[in-house]
Image: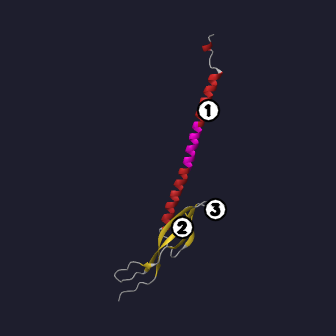
Amino acid sequence: MNRSERGFGLLEAIVALTILATTGVALFSWIGTNLREAGRLKQVEREARWRLQAVEWLNGLNPAENPEGRVEFDGLMLRWTSKPAGDFIEGAALFDEGRSLYQLAPFSVSVDVSEREGDTPLKIDATLLGWRRVRDLTAPD
């Protein structure tokens, strides 16, 4: 039998296993990277959803009346604190009476959003308009 016809030798097997191992390492590295990125994208999507829900809820908040608090809704927990970021000014006049029923001021609001107590919260900072009623509506003469 000729030397070239003997079949698959030890050297060929080692080369084939080396190629297979190198390909496997590259493949598992690629899969690991994709799994990490999928986890990161899931976190980004969750934070975006939390941010949208928190901002929607904050639209109804009057920080002049509720400077701090905590509320739970839709599986989320919001905690906020606020402080005036400017002086109160007169609001727009009602009809042509010349004076508004309300005074308005900007408030700096800091919000922590989380799913459960003890979770690392998503922090949101915003400026909201606060108002307070300073006079009653009187009937025209």
Label 1 residue SS? helix
For badge 3, the amino acid type reads: Gly
Name the mark nearer the viewer: 3 or 1. Answer: 1
55 relative position to 9: left or right? left
Relative image position of residue 4 (x, y in whole percent): 60, 14
Label 2 residue SS? strand
Residue at image location 57% in from the left, 47% down from the top: 36
Quarter of the N terminus within the rendering: top right
For badge 2, the amino acid type reads: Ser
Name the mark nearer the viewer: 3 or 2. Answer: 2
Span highlighted in magenta in the image: 26-39
Q: Name the residue tied to disc 2.
A: 110
Mark sitting on residue 21: 1
Residue at image location 58% in from the left, 43% down from the top: 32
Quarter of the C terminus within the rendering: bottom left
68 relative position to 128: left or right? right
Q: Is residue 9 magenta?
A: no
Q: Name the residue tied to disc 3.
A: 118
